[in-house]
C-alpha cells in the first residue's frame, strides 16, 4: 500500500514528545490523569497518584437499538464507530467546571460506540467525559502510548510470571470507572519484547471484567519493526488472535489510514473470517484532519485529479448501507475545534461555527440529516450510521444542556458567565437536526436562553399560512402506561398561541404521529406544562418531535424547549444537591461577585455571605460586594421540598485593595486560564529579542512542565518564547525557544529561578546564536543560523495550550526585532524609551484598574487581559526598579535631596545638584536597572554640585545619595 506521507507516524500529532513526559492537562486537579509507565507501575488506589475526584459514578447506559424508527431504516447496527479526538488532555483535561466557554465539546454520542481518550504515555479519561458518554451508552477507553523504554517498564513480571502492568491497567480502569485501553506502540522493539507484549495483552483478556475492551493500533508488527498495514492482514493478525492456540489477544484493531481502495476492506474481512473473528472487530481507520490523509475532510483529498469525496462508501458492500464490511475508527475529529474550521478554541464568540461544524460532520454539508447532499458533497457520518438509543426506560429527563455556555441558568434564572463542564451535559437530541416540511424554520441550540445550564433547543424562522415544519428530536424505546405523564418547560417570542405541537411517534404506527398542542403562552417567560399520556397506554413511544404550525402567516416564529420529562405516577423525587461557583474568587474592594447556582433538583435557596455588604440572600444566583480586604466564606443551602443540601466553601473569596490608577504595577497570573492577548505580532527576520521581569509563584513540576512567560508558540511553525521549564529539565530552569528556519532551537539556562523572587530575563538572537540572559548576565548560548519564523498571536503568561500558563507575576514585557546587546539589557531592565529602534511591543503593565494594557512602543499591540479582572493588578514589582514614576528630584523627609540637572541626559556627563546634607559627606552611587553599581564616588562635606561620568549604554539608571543619617534617590535617563 502506498504511503501518502514520508513521515510514518499518524497518531502522533500533538503527542510527538510522549516519551517519558505525561501530557498536559487544563486543570491542576487533573494532574495524574496522565501517568508515565513508571507511575502506572507504582499506582495504588490509596496512593498519591490516585485522584478520587476523577472517579465516575455514572454506569454505562443500556442501548436498545431499532432500525424501524430511523430516518433511513436501510442501515445496520453491525458496524461500530470509534471516535478518537487527538490529544484530549490538551483541551478537555479537567475534572471541575471550567470558567471558560470555548473548550472542546461533543454532542453526537448517539452515532458512536467507543470514545478513545487519546493521550500519552498512559492517558486516563477525565470523569466529566466518562459520565457524559456513559449516559448515552458509549464506552470510553484510555490510552497506552509510549516508547520502547516505556513498554519495557510495562513488561515487568512478578515471581509467578504474571505481568504487573496487566493488573495495574485493570485496577486503574476499574477504580476510575472507564471501559478499557487502547494500545499504540509506534517505536521499534525486539522480537522478544513484542512477544512479551502480546503475552501481556493475552493476560489482560483473562483478567479483564466483562464489558472491558482492549484495542490495538496497527503499527508495530511481530518482528519488532513499525510497519503500518492499513488493514487487518496476516502480518498484524497476531495482535488480534493467536491462530496456533486460537487465543484472543485483543478485542479490536484500529487500522492505519494509508488506504484509498476498496481492497482494504476485502482483505480485512477475509482475514477476520480466517481468524474466526467478526469483521466488526476491525475498526478501519479514517484520519479526517485536513491536508494529511486520503480520508481528510474540508477539503477532500485530491486523488489523481478527483476529490476523494466518497471514501466512506468503501465501508459498505456495493455501497449498500445495510451491509457494512468493517467498523469505523475516526481519528482527529476535533478539526471542528482546532483544525481551522472555526476559531472557537481562541474566540468564544465563534461558537456557532464550531457547533455547525459538529453538525456538518454528521449531517453533511447541508447541515440537515434528512436531505440528500449534492453529488460530490460530504454526506455526513449520519448518512451511513443509524442513531443508537439509550432512552429505554422511565423516568427520562433532559434539559438540553450541551455542557458549556456563555450563561448559566437555574430554573430559568440566568447568571452571565462563560463555563464548560461535560459532567453537566444532558441527553441531547438524537438527530441534529432532522427537519421536514417548510424549510423556513430551523432548529438549533440556543446559547442565550436556557432553563438549566447553558442552552435550550430553539425552533425559529417564519411560517406561511398553513405551513408547518416538523423537527424529530429523540429516538426512544419507552413503554407508555396509563400512569405516564409528559412535562415540558418552554417559552416563545410573545404571549398568545404557541403555534407549536409536540409530535409523538409510536412503534405501531410510525407514519402518523399523535399531536399534543402546546398551551398558549401567558407571557415570554418560561412556562411548565404537564400532559397525561394515558390515551396511549400499552404503546411504545419511538420518536419525540416538535412541529411548528400556524393557520395564519407568522413572520417571526420562535419556540424554545428548556426541559422535557416523562415519568410514571408522581414526578420522581430526587434529592437536591447544592453547588455553585463564583465569577471571580479574587476581587477588589467594592467589586461585585456573582455566584452562579448550579444546584440540581432544588427550587428555593438560602445564601450566607458573611463579610459582604448584604450577608444573606434568597436569590437563585446571589451577588455580594465586600468593602474591606480579607478572605471570606460562602455558604449555599438548596431546598428540594423534602430536605436540604448545604455547600460551604471556606475562604472562597479573597478581597484586595486596588492599586491607584497609574501606579507602578505588575500583573498576576494563575497558571490555568489567565493571560494577556496582544494580537498578531511579526517578529520574523534576521534578529529579535524578548525580555521581561518574572516572579514565579510555583513551578510546574509535573506535566506539562512549561510555564510560558511571553512570546508566541502556536503549536505549528511560529515560535519565539521565553518560558520556564520543559520535559527533561528542572521546572525552574529558563528556556528561550525560537523557530530558526525549519528547526526549533532551545537554549536552557544554567541558573534556576527561585519562587517568590523577581528575576529579569532576556533572550536574543543575532543571526548566529541564541543568547539567554539572567539578571543582565549572559547565562547560556546556542549557535544557530537562519531567519526567525515568528508571525502569530503574541501572549503573556501562556502559549497555544492553556496548561502551559504562568503561575506568578510579570512586569516590563518587551519584544524587539533586533538583538539587544548585553549593555542594553543591563541598563534598560526597568524602563526603555518607547521610540527605541526595533521595539516591536512594550507592555509596562502599569494600567490598573483597566482590563487592557497599553503598548508603549506606539505600534498598537494593546494587550487584552483574558479571564482576568482588576484584582490581578499588583503593586508587587521588582525592588530593583524604583517606584518613583517620573524623572523628578528626590524628596526626603529629613531634607537630603539629589537632582539631575537636564534629565534625560544626552551625553556622557551628568550634572548633579545636592542639598540638605547638613554638613555631612555624601556617597553618590549610580546603579543600572538590575541594581548593579556602575559608578561610585564620595563627595566632601559641603559639596552642592558635581559632574558624574555615565556608562556608554543608554537606558535608565538610579542615582543614590547617602549620608550617615539620610538617603535619597532619583531616576536618571541616559540617552
Image (cartoon, rainbow, N blue to C red):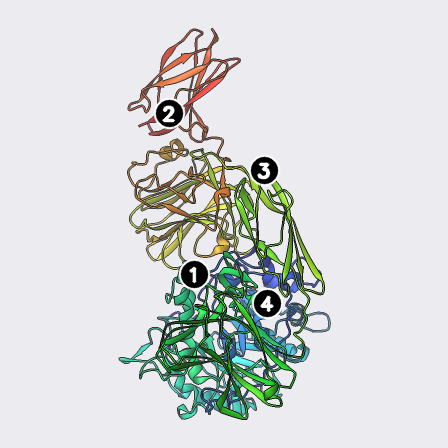
Give how far apart the Cα atoms at labels 3 and 4 are: 58 Å
- Of the 4 image quadrants, the one containing the C terminus is top left
Which element type, helix, strand or loop, lies under badge 3? loop
Which element type, helix, strand or loop, lies under badge 4? helix
The residue that disc 1 covers is: 345
- Of the 4 image quadrants, the one containing the N terminus is bottom left
Q: Earlier in the sequence, mark 3 or mark 4?
A: 4
Residue 934 in the image: x percent, y percent? 41, 24
Which element type, helix, strand or loop, lies under badge 2? loop
Q: Earlier in the sequence, mark 1 or mark 4?
A: 4
Q: Nearer the viewer, residue 169 or 136?
A: 136
Q: Nearer the viewer, residue 533 or 648?
A: 533
Circle 3 Cα neighbour tier, 10 Å, few/some/many (<14 / 14–19 / ≥20): some
Residue 312 in the image: x percent, y percent? 40, 83
Mark sitting on residue 152: 4
Residue 4 in the image: x percent, y percent? 36, 75
Circle 4 Cα neighbour tier, 10 Å, few/some/many (<14 / 14–19 / ≥20): some
Mark yes or no: residue 181 visible.
no
Mark yes or no: residue 658 visible.
yes
Give how far apart the Cα atoms at labels 4 and 2 are: 65 Å
Amino acid at each position: 500500500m502506498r504511503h501518502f506521507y514520508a513521515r510514518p507516524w499518524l497518531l502522533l500529532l500533538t503527542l510527538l514528545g510522549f516519551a517519558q513526559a505525561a501530557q498536559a492537562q487544563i486543570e491542576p486537579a487533573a494532574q495524574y490523569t496522565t501517568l508515565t509507565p513508571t507511575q502506572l507501575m507504582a499506582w495504588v488506589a490509596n496512593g498519591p497518584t490516585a485522584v478520587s475526584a476523577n472517579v465516575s459514578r455514572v454506569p454505562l447506559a443500556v442501548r436498545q437499538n431499532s432500525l424501524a424508527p430511523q430516518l433511513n431504516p436501510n442501515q445496520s447496527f453491525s458496524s461500530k464507530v470509534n471516535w478518537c479526538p487527538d490529544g484530549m488532555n490538551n483541551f478537555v483535561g479537567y475534572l471541575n467546571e471550567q470558567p471558560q466557554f470555548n473548550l472542546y465539546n461533543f454532542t453526537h454520542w448517539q452515532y458512536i460506540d467507543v470514545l478513545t481518550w487519546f493521550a500519552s504515555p498512559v492517558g486516563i479519561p477525565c470523569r466529566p467525559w466518562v459520565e457524559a458518554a456513559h449516559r448515552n451508552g458509549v464506552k470510553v477507553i484510555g490510552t497506552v502510548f509510549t516508547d520502547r523504554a516505556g513498554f519495557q517498564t510495562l513488561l515487568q513480571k512478578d515471581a509467578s510470571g504474571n505481568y504487573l502492568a496487566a493488573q495495574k491497567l485493570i485496577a486503574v480502569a476499574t477504580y476510575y470507572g472507564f471501559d478499557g485501553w487502547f494500545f499504540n506502540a509506534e517505536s521499534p522493539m525486539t522480537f522478544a519484547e513484542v512477544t512479551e507484549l502480546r503475552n501481556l495483552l493475552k493476560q489482560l483478556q483473562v483478567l479483564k471484567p466483562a464489558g472491558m475492551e482492549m484495542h490495538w493500533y496497527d503499527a508495530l508488527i511481530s518482528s519488532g519493526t513499525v510497519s503500518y498495514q492499513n488493514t487487518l492482514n496476516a502480518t498484524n493478525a497476531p495482535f488480534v488472535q493467536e491462530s496456533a492456540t486460537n487465543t484472543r489477544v485483543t478485542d479490536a484493531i484500529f487500522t492505519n489510514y494509508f488506504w484509498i481502495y476498496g481492497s482494504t476492506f476485502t482483505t480485512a474481512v477475509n482475514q477476520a473470517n480466517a481468524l474466526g473473528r467478526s469483521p466488526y472487530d476491525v475498526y478501519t481507520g479514517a484520519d479526517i484532519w485536513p491536508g494529511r490523509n486520503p480520508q481528510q475532510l474540508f477539503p477532500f483529498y485530491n486523488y489523481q485529479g478527483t476529490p476523494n469525496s466518497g471514501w466512506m462508501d468503501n465501508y459498505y458492500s456495493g455501497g449498500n448501507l445495510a451491509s457494512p464490511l468493517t467498523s469505523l475508527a475516526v481519528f482527529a475529529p476535533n478539526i471542528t475545534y482546532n483544525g481551522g474550521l472555526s476559531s472557537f478554541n481562541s474566540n468564544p464568540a465563534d461558537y456557532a461555527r464550531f457547533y455547525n461544524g459538529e453538525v456538518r460532520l454528521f449531517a453533511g454539508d447541508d447541515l440537515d440529516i434528512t436531505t440528500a447532499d449534492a453529488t460530490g458533497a460530504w454526506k455526513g457520518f449520519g448518512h451511513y450510521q443509524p442513531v443508537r438509543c439509550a432512552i429505554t426506560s422511565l423516568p427520562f429527563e433532559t434539559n438540553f444542556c450541551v455542557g458549556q455556555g456563555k450563561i448559566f441558568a437555574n430554573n430559568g434564572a440566568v447568571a452571565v458567565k462563560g463555563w464548560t463542564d461535560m459532567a453537566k451535559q444532558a441527553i441531547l437530541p438524537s438527530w441534529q437536526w432532522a427537519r421536514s416540511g417548510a424549510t423556513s424554520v430551523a432548529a438549533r441550540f440556543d446559547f442565550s436562553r436556557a432553563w438549566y445550564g447553558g442552552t435550550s433547543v430553539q425552533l425559529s424562522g417564519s411560517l406561511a399560512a398553513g405551513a408547518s415544519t416538523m423537527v424529530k428530536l429523540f429516538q426512544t424505546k419507552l413503554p407508555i402506561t396509563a400512569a405516564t405523564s409528559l412535562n415540558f418547560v418552554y417559552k416563545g417570542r410573545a404571549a398568545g398561541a404557541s403555534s407549536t405541537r409536540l409530535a409523538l411517534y409510536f412503534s405501531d404506527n410510525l407514519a402518523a404521529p399523535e399531536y399534543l398542542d402546546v398551551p398558549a403562552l401567558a407571557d415570554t417567560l418560561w412556562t411548565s406544562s404537564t400532559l397525561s399520556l394515558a390515551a396511549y397506554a400499552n404503546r411504545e413511544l419511538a420518536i419525540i418531535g416538535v412541529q411548528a404550525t400556524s393557520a395564519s402567516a407568522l413572520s417571526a416564529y420562535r419556540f424554545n424547549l428548556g426541559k422535557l420529562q416523562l415519568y410514571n405516577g408522581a414526578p420522581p423525587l430526587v434529592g437536591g444537591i447544592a453547588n455553585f461557583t463564583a465569577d471571580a474568587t479574587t476581587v477588589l474592594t467594592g467589586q461585585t461577585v456573582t455566584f452562579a447556582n448550579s444546584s440540581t433538583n432544588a427550587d428555593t435557596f438560602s445564601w450566607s455571605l458573611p463579610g459582604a455588604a448584604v450577608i444573606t440572600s434568597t436569590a437563585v444566583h446571589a451577588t455580594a460586594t465586600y468593602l474591606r480586604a480579607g478572605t471570606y466564606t460562602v455558604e449555599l443551602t438548596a431546598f428540594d421540598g423534602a430536605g436540604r443540601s448545604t455547600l460551604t466553601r471556606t475562604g472562597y473569596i479573597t478581597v484586595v485593595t486596588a492599586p491607584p490608577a497609574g501606579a507602578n504595577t505588575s500583573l498576576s497570573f494563575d497558571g490555568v486560564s489567565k493571560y494577556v492577548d496582544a494580537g498578531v505580532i511579526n517578529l520574523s527576520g534576521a534578529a529579535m529579542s524578548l525580555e521581561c521581569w518574572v516572579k514565579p509563584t510555583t513551578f510546574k513540576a509535573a506535566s506539562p512542565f512549561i510555564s510560558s512567560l511571553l512570546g508566541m508558540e502556536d503549536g505549528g511553525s511560529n515560535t519565539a518564547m521565553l518560558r520556564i521549564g520543559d520535559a527533561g529539565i528542572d521546572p525552574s530552569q529558563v528556556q528561550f525557544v525560537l523557530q530558526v528556519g525549519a528547526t526549533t532551537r532551545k537554549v536552557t539556562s544554567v541558573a534556576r529561578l527561585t519562587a517568590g523572587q523577581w528575576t529579569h530575563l532576556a533572550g536574543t538572537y543575532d543571526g548566529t546564536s541564541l543568547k539567554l540572559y539572567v539578571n543582565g548576565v549572559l547565562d547560556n548560548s546556542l549557535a544557530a543560523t537562519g531567519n526567525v519564523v515568528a508571525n502569530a498571536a503574541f501572549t503573556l503568561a501562556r502559549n497555544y495550550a492553556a496548561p502551559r500558563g504562568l503561575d506568578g507575576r510579570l512586569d516590563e514585557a518587551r519584544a524587539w526585532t533586533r538583538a539587544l546587546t548585553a549593555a542594553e539589557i543591563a541598563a534598560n531592565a526597568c524602563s526603555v524609551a518607547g521610540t527605541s529602534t526595533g521595539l516591536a511591543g512594550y507592555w509596562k503593565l502599569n494600567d490598573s484598574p483597566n482590563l487592557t494594557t497599553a503598548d508603549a512602543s506606539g505600534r498598537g499591540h494593546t494587550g487584552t487581559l483574558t479571564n482576568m479582572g482588576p484584582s490581578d493588578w499588583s503593586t508587587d514589582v521588582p525592588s530593583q526598579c524604583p517606584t518613583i514614576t517620573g524623572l523628578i528630584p528626590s524628596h526626603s523627609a529629613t531634607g537630603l535631596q539629589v537632582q539631575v540637572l537636564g534629565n534625560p541626559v544626552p551625553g556622557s556627563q551628568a550634572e548633579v545638584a545636592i542639598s540638605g546634607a547638613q554638613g555631612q559627606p555624601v556617597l553618590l552611587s549610580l546603579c543600572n536597572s538590575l541594581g548593579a553599581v556602575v559608578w561610585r564616588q564620595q563627595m566632601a562635606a559641603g559639596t552642592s554640585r558635581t559632574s558624574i561620568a555615565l556608562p556608554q549604554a543608554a537606558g535608565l539608571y538610579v542615582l543614590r545619595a547617602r549620608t550617615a543619617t539620610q538617603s535619597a534617590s532619583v531616576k536618571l535617563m541616559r540617552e
